[in-house]
Image (cartoon, grey):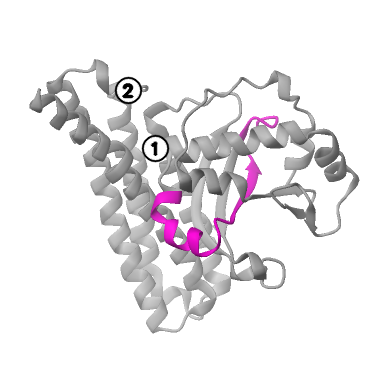
Amino acid sequence: MNEVEELLKLEPKDLPPLSPIVLDDLHQNVLKNLYLELGSGPVLHLLSPSYSQLHPNPNPALTELVTKREPLLDHVKEVLVQNLAVYSVLLQVNSYFIEQNNFLVLARLNERDSGGRRYEVQYYTHSPVELLSHYEDKIYIGRDFVDLFNFKRKYFGVREIIASLKVQSEKLIDRAEDRLKKPLEYKSFFQEIRESVGEINTESLSVLESLPPYLDAAKVGEIDLIEINAQYRAVAHYLIELNDEVAEFENLLRFKMEIGFVRYVTKFKKDLTNLINLFNIKINGALTARINGLRQK
């Protein structure tokens, strides 16, 4: 974990300016109440919305970051929330829990060997009152991927999220031997998940390569838009099939009282559900609305 050190290498003036967008009340409140979790060496450091160093004791690098790079941290938070607003449905589909927690959202940044440019971000929400005393009770919202130097995403960002499913599924399988009481009993489920994830990666890549990487729906004709919508829907159908398999596996684990492992399956299913919601709301939902609008003219 080297997020603190990598961010220290960046200067706010070197980052491309963000285009202003109108945020709804949910995203505005999350921006005001966004906590950051940044790694330095083996330690994760938690920063409050005002960059107070909450846990654990700060090291010199973190102290330098919060005292000398506050504009950079402000920019990072703006990038995170704008990406959530434009390319994600994580806040919308988890709005009940977020509002119950007074809009407290925690963003854990994982730098992706890019010199401080690209990050995988895991989002959680938690009761403000018990954040420090019962940190382990945080609720996982989902994950997103951001590039501090390039806001625009190819294919609505789905290619990167689908690729991450393969990584997460392999981590899930690796944990099984240590966390399950009888891992061989669930061998068929792991085989199905591995095969399904592989098929999703292969088929989705083939579909996406046939589509425009940056789609401006306002400049595409009705026939082409209908075909593009159908192609994206085909990818979503693969995800729905995998989600059903994972849900069946999760239910069996709960029945078998495999408490030490089932939470990892639940988290993986959450990522799948979030991606399906992304298709339903931001991709197929938006494209269908555009198509219907064309037909009404």
Q: Relative to 285, is 79 on the left or the right?
A: right
What residue span does the magenta drawing correspond to? 91-118
User: Which sits in the foreground, 103 or 9?
Assistant: 103
Could you tell which of marks 1 and 2 lies nearer the N-terminus? Answer: 1
Residue placed furthest toward the right: 60
User: Which sits in the foreground, 68 or 62?
Assistant: 68
Q: Classify mark 1: residues with Cα within 10 Å, few (<14), some (14-19) or many (20+).
A: many
User: Which sits in the foreground, 157 or 22?
Assistant: 22
Which is in the foreground here, disc 1 or disc 2?
2
From this view, report whether residue 178 is shown above or below residue 241.
Answer: below
Q: At x 34% / y 53%, what residue is drawn?
A: 195
Q: Mark 1 points at which residue?
A: 158
Q: Where is residue 137 in the image (x, y as percent from the top left)?
A: 59, 70
Q: At x 39% / y 37%, what residue is drawn?
A: 158
Using the image, tell me which numbered label, if any, was put on residue 278: none
Q: Name the residue under label 2.
A: 215
* Residue at mark 1 to residue at mark 2: CA–CA distance: 13 Å
Residue 160 in sight from this viewpoint: no
Q: Where is residue 291 in the image (x, y as percent from the top left)?
A: 16, 29
Q: Position of residue 22 (x, y in %)?
A: 46, 32
Q: Relative to 208, is 149 on the left or the right?
A: right
Residue placed furthest toward the top: 219
Q: Relative to 79, is 269 on the left or the right?
A: left
